[in-house]
Image (tube, helix red, strand yellow):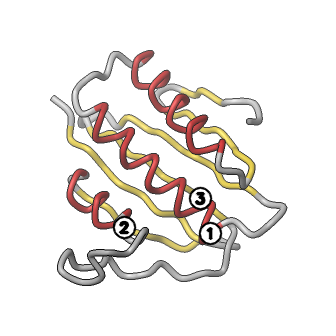
Amino acid sequence: MNEQLQQGHTREAFYRRDRRSIALARDFTRETLTTWSITDRMDDALLCVSELTTNAILHGAPPGRGFAVHLSLHPDGVLRIEVHDSGTHELRKVRTPYKQLDADSGRGLMLVAAFADKWGVGERAPGKVVWCEFGLG
């Protein structure tokens, strides 16, 4: 992991395209939320970080590149989690629960949609940013 930046209530960290980075990103999120005295919805946030970073590794970050996790706490009490990657893959649609029940993967965005208050995807050059938000309090 590269140097973590803290500016007010925003932190970010960069990770290599490596499965071990999922746990590192989760630890970074846990430590940040603890520092910010956020315990409300921590488990939901950690689950979403796991899912979004897994997707970045599997589908977003090209070999030899990595991804960034941005955490921000807005004055209105909203926690925003963003995962930035430089890949060209488009985001796949959220699968419906009744399709492919025996599949080993494909439920990550469905979980993010279920646990976060909002989520979405945006463009960046190159790549994309997938984000989710949690109302706190």
Relative placement, left or right, of 37 versus 85 is: left
**Disc 1 from disc 2: Cα separation:** 15 Å
Q: Is disc 3 surrounded by few (<14), some (14 to 19) or many (20+) residues within 10 Å?
A: many
Q: With respect to residue 43, does 53 lie above or below?
A: below
Is the C terminus in the top left, top right, bottom left or bottom right quadrant? top left
**Disc 3 from disc 2: Cα separation:** 12 Å
Q: Residue 118 appears at what percent x and percent y?
A: 25, 58
**Disc 3 from disc 1: Cα separation:** 9 Å
Query: Which residue does the image show at 70% across and 73% down from the upper left?
Result: 126
Q: Residue 94 appears at what percent x and percent y?
A: 32, 76
Secondary element type, mark 3 = strand
Q: Residue 73 appears at what percent x and percent y?
A: 38, 34
Q: With respect to residue 67, does 121 lie above or below?
A: below
Task: Name the N-terminal-most of marks 1 and 2.
Answer: 1
Q: Is disc 2 surrounded by few (<14), some (14 to 19) or many (20+) residues within 10 Å?
A: some
Q: With respect to residue 35, does 128 lie above or below?
A: below
Secondary element type, mark 2 = strand
Amino acid on which disc 2 is placed? Gly
Amino acid on which disc 1 is placed? Gly
Which quadrant of the structure image shows residue 64?
bottom right
Residue tagged by mark 1? 60
Residue tagged by mark 2? 120
Q: Nearer the viewer, mark 3 or mark 1?
A: 1
Residue tagged by mark 3? 84
